[in-house]
Amino acid sequence: MSVERRGLLIILSSPSGAGKSTLAKRLMQWDESLSFSVSATTRAPRAGEENGVDYHFTSEEDFKSMVSKGEMLEHALVFGNYYGSPAGRVRQAIEAGRDVLFDVDWQGAQQIANSSLRDHVLSIFVLPPSIVELRRRLETRGQDSAEVIEKRMRQSWDEISHWDGYDYVLVNDDLDTSFERLKTIVSAERLHRRQQPGLLEIVRGLQAEFEGLES
């Protein structure tokens, strides 16, 4: 008999270059029922960006109103614009048994872990095997200038220093191995007792059946 389950709020964090984005992409290919959390922002849309797909574009007044009402799981001010994760859509997904994936830094992860949906949070931190390897990955992916790479390297230790605030930690020395471990973590957490509200009804049914045999 299948048991109804609640969805997971899956957080992936890492310093830039550790492999978080690649693991997130693989996870969504592995299970197409997974959805990626679409952030809200007060910045203006850029060319080609679609409201509700790339971001939920909103006014600063409306954004701050959502924060004051507790309707943001996490939020931050970045270069003069606000970014955040609306709670309503995530809550609906979780109650419907759908998992939602978040790509946030340690500060966002901490806010979510202290939110009203804390009981459904699964947080995973991805570590590089070494700092030398982290730099090599940043340099070989060819996305950033030398100046940006240096900035990311300076920021990396601040991210890494918060590793112990997560439920699980993956050392991404081999991408395929790390992905297999990530799938194992997600699969096991989906079976956690707190994620299966229908279990109590099943146990009560078993108890009634057992008592019927004894009478």
Image: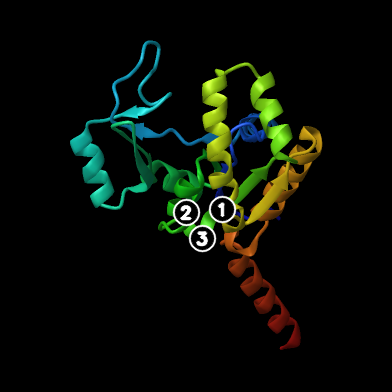
Left or right: where does residue 144 sit relative to residue 56?
right
Residue 126 or residue 114, whichever sits in front:
126
| 10 Å crowding of disc 3: few (<14), some (14-19), many (20+) | few
In the rendered structure, which amino acid carries the disc numbered 2? Answer: Gln
Where, quadrant-wise, is the N terminus in this rendering? bottom right
Which quarter of the picture shows residue 90? top left
Say few, some or many: other residues with alpha carbon within 10 Å of mark 1 (under 14 / 14 to 19 / 20 or more).
some
Q: Position of residue 18 (x, y in %)?
A: 66, 35
Relative vertical location of residue 148 with respect to residue 93 in this rendering, above or below:
above
**Sequence-earlier tag: 2 or 1:** 2
Q: Which residue is mark 3?
A: 119
Residue sitting at the far bottom: 215
* Comparing labels 3 and 2, the label whose residue is closer to the camera: 2
Picture residue at 57% right of the left edge, 40% below the top? 156
Secondary structure state at the residue bearing disc 3:
helix
- In this view, which residue lies farthest toward the left? 61
**Can you give x and y, in whole percent of width and height, for residue 56 in the image?**
35, 29
Q: Under tag 2, what secondary structure? A: helix
The mark tally for this picture is 3
Q: CA distance from mark 1 to mark 3?
A: 20 Å
Above or below, 35 against 125 in this view is above
Query: Which residue does the numbered mark 2 point to in the structure image?
Result: 110
Q: Nearer the viewer, residue 116 or 18?
A: 18
Q: Secondary structure at mark 1?
A: loop
What's the residue type where badge 1 is placed?
Answer: His
Residue 136 lies in what quarter of the image?
top right
Badge 2 density bin: few <14, some 14–19, many ≥20, Cα 10 Å: some
Find residue 162 and name its label. Answer: 1
